[in-house]
Structures are given as structure tokens and as C-alpha cells.
Image (cartoon, rainbow, N blue to C red):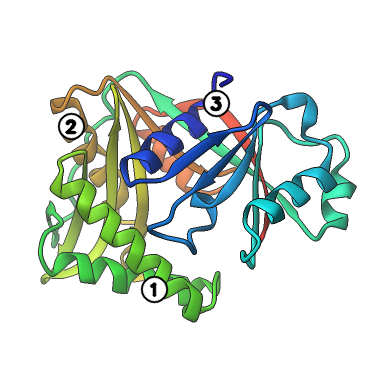
């Protein structure tokens, strides 16, 4: 297997923790997540050969043969294709993800007043599902009928990771109502952040940056010396991550049809 970009290496490490399989086919990988069959980026193709990323028709066919019942197409690329039009012709949108990393413990900010923070446990997990569903509906990203089973399956796997102490998920609560949460998973000595989410009514108060620091210290206490987080290129959240010490490490391209 080729040496994978930092984003994919940590993606796969997290997925393997939850039982996903990775099939190496030389110039690409087939990733499958049986426990969450509607998780688009857990059931996808990753093109590992930079010289092959312009063959859109081939990769669409590879995906469809690997996932014949999928209603989506999710293909990861190591660089932006030169022939962008061939991907558009297949009704695929190309998106750039920014990978940020640091080898220094992220800076801990102050907890905003009016909030309490704890590791998710018990009924907190159901609140995490409800918040994810509410934010998806607010953004209009996915139909609820397909998104809710995905969100519940994802939360179940996250809870299992937390129970095994491979990962930890932290929430900020206002009067016992979940306002923001995020997770972190140990991938050897590298820690990968997961599922950063804040209720729209509680944004721009510093909750995410505070939780970043709390999660980073948990990972450091468990032997991690590097921290990785991924966001859409141009997402304002990137400024928050940079403010606590993260720096650009790489970028990955996603070819996606939802």
C-alpha cells in the first residue's frame, strides 16, 4: 500500500477501530463499513495513485461495481484533477478538504460562562443524535429519512469507541441541554478529531475552541503527540483551529454525488 495522506491514514485508522474493512487494489482502496451502510465516506473509493485521478469514468465505474446498491458516489482523490469537466459530466462535485495538524498541544482557551463540560455518557448520547439531526435539518444538507439512521449508527460506534477508551467525546451543556460537542480518537500516537458540532444558538462563544483543548489533553494523557483535524476549505472553523495552534498540513479532494 502506498503511504497514505495524513487525512486518509487517520480516517482509515478510525474506521478500522469500528470494524470497517479496507481492500487494497494497487492504485485505489475500497473502504466498507458494514455497521453503517449509509455512511457515504465509510463506504467509498480512495484513489491512491496521483497519476490516475483524471480518469473520472473509470472511478465512477469502480465505485458502482463495488457498491451496486449505493444511491451516492464518494471517491477520494489525492489532488485536484486537471480534467475537472469529466467529473462534472458524471454529475460529481469536486470539493477540497483542508487538513490541519500540530505536534504541539493545542492551546486551552477559557470556558465561556454559563456552561458545564463533561465527557458524554448515558442520555447525553441521545442529545448528541438530536443535535446532529437538528443541525442537518437547519442546513438542509441531507433528507432526514436517510440522515437519521446514519446519525444514530455513527453515534453508536462513537459510544463504543468511548466505552473502549479508544476515543472520547465531550459536550458543553447549558442547563443540562447539549450546546456543543466533539470527539477525538487515538490512531497510534496521532489523535484525530471527530464530529465537531455546535447548536446554532450557541455559536461564536468559544465553545468549540474550549472543547478542542479538553479533548487534546485527554489524547495527550493517552500517549498522543500529534493532533489532526479536517474541515472544508474556506470553512470559518479553520480560523478557530488555527487560533489554538493548528497549521495546514495537506489537502484532499472529494468527488461526491450525494
User: 243 or 120, which is in the foreground?
Assistant: 120
Towards the viewer: 97 or 78: 78
**Residue 198 in sight:** no
Q: Residues within 10 Å of mark 3 (few under 14, many from 20)?
A: some
What is the crowding at mark 1: few (fewer than 14 residues within 10 Å), some, or many (at least 20)? many
Give the quadrant of the C terminus.
bottom right
Q: Looking at the image, is mark 3 or mark 2 earlier in the sequence?
A: 3
Left or right: where 97 falls relative to 59: left
Residue 220, image x and y in percent?
19, 26
What residue lies at 75% left-to-right and 44% top-to-bottom?
A: 59
Label 1, secondary structure: give it: helix
Residue 50 position within the rendered picture, expressed as x and y whole percent measured from the top left? 73, 26
Q: Is residue 132 visible?
A: yes
> What residue is shown at x 57% (from left), y 27% (from top)?
250
Residue at the spot x=22%, y=71% of the render? 126
User: How dense is the environment of label 2, judged by Cα within 10 Å: few (below 14), some, or many (20 and up)?
Assistant: some
| Position of residue 233 measured from the top left corner of the image (x, y, whole percent) | 59, 43
Judged from the image, the secondary structure of the residue bearing numbered disc 3 is: loop
Q: CA distance from mark 2 to mark 1?
A: 28 Å
Q: Please, what secondary structure does the residue beneath circle 2 have?
A: helix
Q: Quadrant of the N terminus?
A: top right
Quadrant of the rendered structure where residue 107 is? Answer: top left
Q: Nearer the viewer, mark 1 or mark 3?
A: 3
The residue that label 2 is drawn on is: 217
Q: Report which residue position mark 3 lands on.
A: 5
The residue carrying mark 1 is: 133
Separation of residues labelled 1 and 3 (CA atoms): 30 Å
Query: Image height check: is 159 above or below 140?
Result: above
Amino acid at each position: 500500500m502506498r503511504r497514505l495522506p495524513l487525512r486518509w491514514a487517520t480516517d482509515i485508522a478510525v474506521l478500522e477501530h469500528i470494524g470497517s474493512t479496507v481492500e487494497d487494489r494497487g492504485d485505489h482502496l475500497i473502504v466498507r463499513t458494514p455497521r453503517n451502510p449509509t455512511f457515504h465516506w465509510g463506504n467509498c473509493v480512495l484513489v491512491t495513485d496521483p497519476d490516475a485521478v483524471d480518469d473520472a469514468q473509470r472511478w465512477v465505474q469502480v465505485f458502482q461495481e463495488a457498491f451496486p446498491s449505493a444511491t451516492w458516489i464518494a471517491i477520494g482523490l489525492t489532488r485536484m484533477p486537471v480534467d475537472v469537466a469529466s467529473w462534472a459530466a458524471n454529475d460529481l462535485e469536486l470539493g477540497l478538504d483542508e487538513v490541519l495538524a500540530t505536534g504541539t498541544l493545542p492551546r486551552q482557551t477559557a470556558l465561556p460562562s454559563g456552561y458545564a463540560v463533561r465527557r458524554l455518557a448515558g442520555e447525553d448520547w441521545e442529545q448528541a443524535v438530536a443535535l446532529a439531526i437538528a443541525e442537518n435539518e437547519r442546513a438542509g444538507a441531507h433528507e432526514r429519512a436517510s440522515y437519521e439512521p446514519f446519525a444514530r449508527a455513527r453515534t453508536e460506534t462513537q459510544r463504543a469507541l468511548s466505552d473502549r477508551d479508544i476515543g472520547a467525546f465531550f459536550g458543553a451543556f447549558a442547563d443540562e441541554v447539549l450546546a456543543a460537542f466533539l470527539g477525538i480518537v487515538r490512531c497510534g500516537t496521532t489523535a484525530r478529531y471527530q464530529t465537531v458540532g455546535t447548536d446554532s444558538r450557541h455559536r461564536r462563544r468559544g465553545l468549540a475552541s474550549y472543547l478542542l483543548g479538553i479533548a487534546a489533553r485527554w489524547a495527550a494523557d493517552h500517549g498522543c503527540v500529534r493532533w489532526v483535524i479536517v474541515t472544508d476549505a474556506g470553512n470559518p472553523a479553520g480560523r478557530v483551529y488555527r487560533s489554538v495552534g493548528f497549521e495546514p498540513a495537506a489537502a484532499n479532494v472529494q468527488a461526491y454525488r450525494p
